[in-house]
Amino acid sequence: MLLSSIQTLLHSQAHQAGFDAAGIAAAPAPGSPEDEAERTRFAGWVDAGRAGEMEYLKRRDQAGLLLRSSVRIALPWARSVIVCAANYNSAQPRSTDPAPESAAWIARYAWTGSGDRPSDYHKVLLRRLQNLRDQLTTGLGPFQSRCFVDTGPVVERVYARYAGIGWIGKNTCILNQHLGSWLFLGVIVTSIELRPDQDQGQLTLPAADRCGSCTRCIDACPTHALTAPRQMDASRCIAYLTIEKRGEIPEELRAGIGRQVFGCDICQDVCPWNRRAPASADPGLAPRPALVNPALDWLAHLDEAGFSRLFNGSPVRRAKWAGFRRNLAIAMGNSRQQRFVPILTQWSRDTDPVLAEAARWAVEHLRRD
Ligand code: B12
Ligand code: SF4
Ligand code: SF4
């Protein structure tokens, strides 16, 4: 199918389905230069230990190929990838703005919901992708497809770049010139074979890189997870440590975690392209104000049932109760607030050895302040 004909239909239908940007990229043939470049990059990243304990990123097929290194490994019928983006920016403070020392930080992407009811972008976007696929099938005729948000064998940012959604910033996030980087991505992997338009001659037209000489994100990262432009050691990233990592967080990284108790927004909050990013009017991705700069006291005094009530159906559940309390202990240790010593002393006797150890570290850390 001609690239331009599907692009025209896609742009109109994607907006109706609730997306702010959409594009389509070819799924490069095995052995082609594009395929080799992305496979080598992903394999090099995994082999260097950058994925930490995220075992799902390291899954291989029977031939030993990393499933996520190329979409055609797990889905041999794939010929193109439709990438959709939804803006979740809101007119709320940034993590880097001045805030009380006793305020925690939950990453912006986990604020969504309506009133007290949390929502999870995975579910919100998946429903929209399925609706969009139905509309495209009506317009184009049947094709094979799979919709994914996060969980598919796809490095979504690579296809987002080739689909022209944005460039990969030095913080490794997809950045769109008009929308900034507060974007959720979702993909529809399809069997549609793309043909370039005559006047265009090529299929891949990645968005131009507009980072220039800026290095604000790299300079601001407190745990030095951005080891070079567009290169992340995820095992050092606060998002990984507070969401994905089970068990103890390496001691040398705890002070850098600061007040982040779930995820981290620092390298996007300092990005000049996000200063002019429009706030989203999307009711499905509206922020819950209670989660913006929440008080550490409040979160630390939640019991397990309270944690479930607040976060059931929210991405925060991924950290689990145990991980969330471990993160709270570290944030209290970093708060310079001596009044957290009693609760931390109580936690240091907890039956959960990870929490007890984090709490002992936090008490020690507060004593040194
Ligand atoms: C694992 C994962 C993580 C890990 C690792 C992140 C990472 N940078 O690799 C952790 C837990 C740390 C993480 C953190 C976050 N994540 Co995350 N994550 C994923 C997931 C599930 C897989 C990503 C992956 O495969 N990483 C492996 C590396 C190799 O790939 P990559 O970082 O995506 O991109 C690399 C390639 O693009 C390559 N590359 C491509 N072209 C070029 C060109 C050159 C010249 C170079 C050098 C490199 C290069 O370099 C990039 C960096 O290595 C994706 C969803 C998906 N299925 O893709 C979401 C995803 C990337 N995450 C997302 C989000 C929102 C976040 C957070 C903002 C959440 C938060 N606030 O805490 C942070 C952002 C941190 C950051 N600065 O990236 C969004 C990103 C949207 C966007 N605008 O880019 C995604 C796409 C989820 C979604 N469906 O919306 N995440
Ligand atoms: S999300 Fe935070 S820890 Fe991770 S790279 Fe960005 S600033 Fe560093
Ligand atoms: S902070 Fe600067 S270098 Fe980093 S992603 Fe934004 S523009 Fe690029």
Image: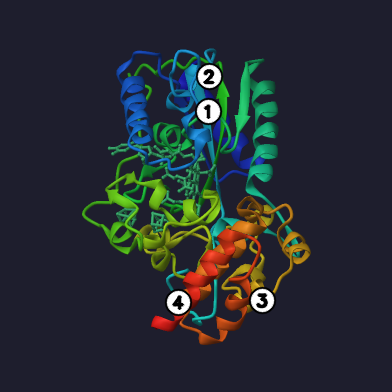
- Residue 74 numbered mark, or none: 2
Judge by depth and name the residue closer to the eye, 160 or 309.
Answer: 309
Queried on whether the Cβ of the residue with tag 1 lies below 8 angstroms from ligand 1, the answer reads no
- Residue 153 numbered mark, or none: 1
| Residue farthest toward the left in the current orientation of the protein | 213
Query: Label 1 is placed on what type of residue?
Result: Pro
Measuring from the top left, give residue 112's x and y in whole percent: 65, 58
Kind of element beneath mark 1: loop
Judge by depth and name the residue closer to the eye, 82 or 367.
Answer: 367
Query: Label 4 is placed on what type of residue?
Result: Glu
Query: Could you tell which of marks 1 and 4 lies nearer the N-terminus?
Result: 1
Q: How many labels does the image show?
A: 4
Measuring from the top left, give residue 83's x and y in whole percent: 52, 34
Query: Could you tell which of marks 2 and 1 lies nearer the N-terminus?
Result: 2
For the residues bearing labels 3 and 1, Cβ distance under 8 angstroms: no
Relative vertical location of residue 273 with respect to residue 198 in this rendering, above or below? below
Judge by depth and name the residue closer to the eye, 313 or 325.
Answer: 325
Q: Distance between the residues labelled 3 and 1?
A: 38 Å
- Check disc 3 and report the residue beneath it: 298
For the residues bearing labels 2 and 1, Cβ distance under 8 angstroms: yes
